[in-house]
């Protein structure tokens, strides 16, 4: 499984509004080879790029993503809350974002982000779009979503996301048939990573915003890091 070393978090990290096409373009201009973004279902079942279940923080609009038809979400301004210079930036669909990744030659980690109670529908809905593209890894904190994604994903690789050390990561990977683990950076030590590397499981770490922390993680054997600050690396280091 191929991982870029430096993966821009939520499209372009802190340099652009999160989960937007502008973020993808900035990441590519910096020389990033990989990006991560979050995909959630609209009310009518279309995967769109957004992190929160509600619209307020990133768009200023009111309401829940799961209650909003995609036509309404498309009218949200996903840029101005980040900076007025990005006013009018659209809230993209997953299909649009993956088409831009293809155009820019970007590897993409699509994080399946289900609204409460929509785990399986989000997993399969995201997989059905993503299977039309190459150079993709699907991931999720939701085991139910990852299992549902397997049905629609064809041969797309899948990664389990974890934010705590439950002591049974390898068991969970086997249960969902995932090939890689994405781990909160502070959990990673030589001791906890060893069984994963012995099992040839690629490990990626989030969210790593300091070079020294990235160097610690690469020395442990991590394949890639998700960062809000891709500008801390030069293109030939990514
Ligand atoms: O996929 C890595 C990272 O994005 C997970 O956390 O909350 O930023 O989606 P979050
Ligand atoms: Mg994410």
Image (cartoon, helix red, strand yellow):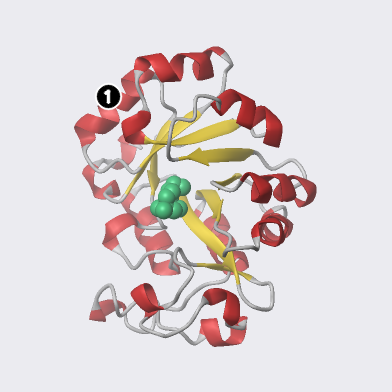
Residue 2 in view? no
Q: Position of residue 73 (x, y in %)?
A: 53, 82
Residue at the image point whose x is 41% and y is 85% from the top: 61
Residue at the image point whose x is 36% and y is 73% from the top: 58
> At numbered mark 1, what does the secondary structure look like: helix, strand or loop?
helix
**Viewer-side residue, 99 vs 74:** 74
Q: How dense is the environment of label 1, judged by Cα within 10 Å: few (below 14), some, or many (20 and up)?
A: few
Q: Position of residue 95 (x, y in %)?
A: 62, 66
Residue 216 in view? yes
Query: Ligand 1 within 8 A of label 1's CB?
Result: no
Badge 1 is on which residue? Answer: 216
Residue at the image point whose x is 41% and y is 26% from the top: 222
Vertical placement of residue 43 versus 98, above or below? below
Residue at the image point whose x is 58% and y is 63% from the top: 116
In the image: residue 222, left or right of residue 14:
right
Question: Would you identify the image quadrant in which residue 68 lies?
Answer: bottom right
In the image: residue 11, left or right of residue 171:
left
Vertical placement of residue 196 versus 181, above or below? above
Position of the N terminus by quadrant: top right
Q: Position of residue 210 (x, y in %)?
A: 21, 39
User: How many badges with numbers are in the image?
Assistant: 1
**Viewer-side residue, 5 vs 105:** 5
Position of the C terminus by quadrant: top left
Question: Would you identify the image quadrant in which residue 22 lies?
Answer: bottom left
């Amino acid at each position: 499984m191929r991982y870029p070393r430096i993966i821009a978090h939520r499209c372009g990290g802190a340099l652009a509004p999160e989960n937007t096409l502008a973020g993808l373009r900035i990441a590519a201009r910096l020389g990033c080879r990989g990006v991560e973004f979050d995909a959630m279902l609209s009310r009518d079942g279309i995967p769109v790029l957004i992190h929160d279940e509600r619209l307020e923080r990133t768009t200023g609009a009111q309401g829940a993503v799961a209650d909003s038809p995609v036509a309404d979400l498309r009218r949200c301004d996903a840029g101005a809350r980040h900076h007025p210079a990005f006013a009018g930036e659209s809230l993209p669909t997953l299909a649009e974002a993956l088409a831009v990744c293809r155009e820019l030659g970007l590897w993409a980690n699509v994080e399946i982000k289900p609204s409460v109670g929509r785990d399986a529908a989000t997993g399969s809905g995201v997989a059905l779009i993503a299977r039309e593209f190459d150079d993709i890894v699907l991931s999720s904190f939701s085991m139910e979503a990852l299992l549902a994604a397997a049905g629609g994903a064809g041969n797309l690789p899948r990664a389990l996301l974890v934010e705590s050390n439950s002591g049974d990561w390898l068991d969970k990977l086997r249960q969902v048939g995932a090939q890689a683990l994405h781990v909160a950076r502070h959990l990673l030590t030589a001791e906890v990573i060893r069984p994963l590397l012995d099992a040839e499981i690629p490990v990626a770490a989030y969210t790593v915003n300091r070079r020294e922390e990235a160097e610690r993680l690469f020395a442990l054997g991590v394949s890639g890091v998700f960062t809000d600050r891709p500008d801390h690396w030069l293109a030939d280091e990514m």
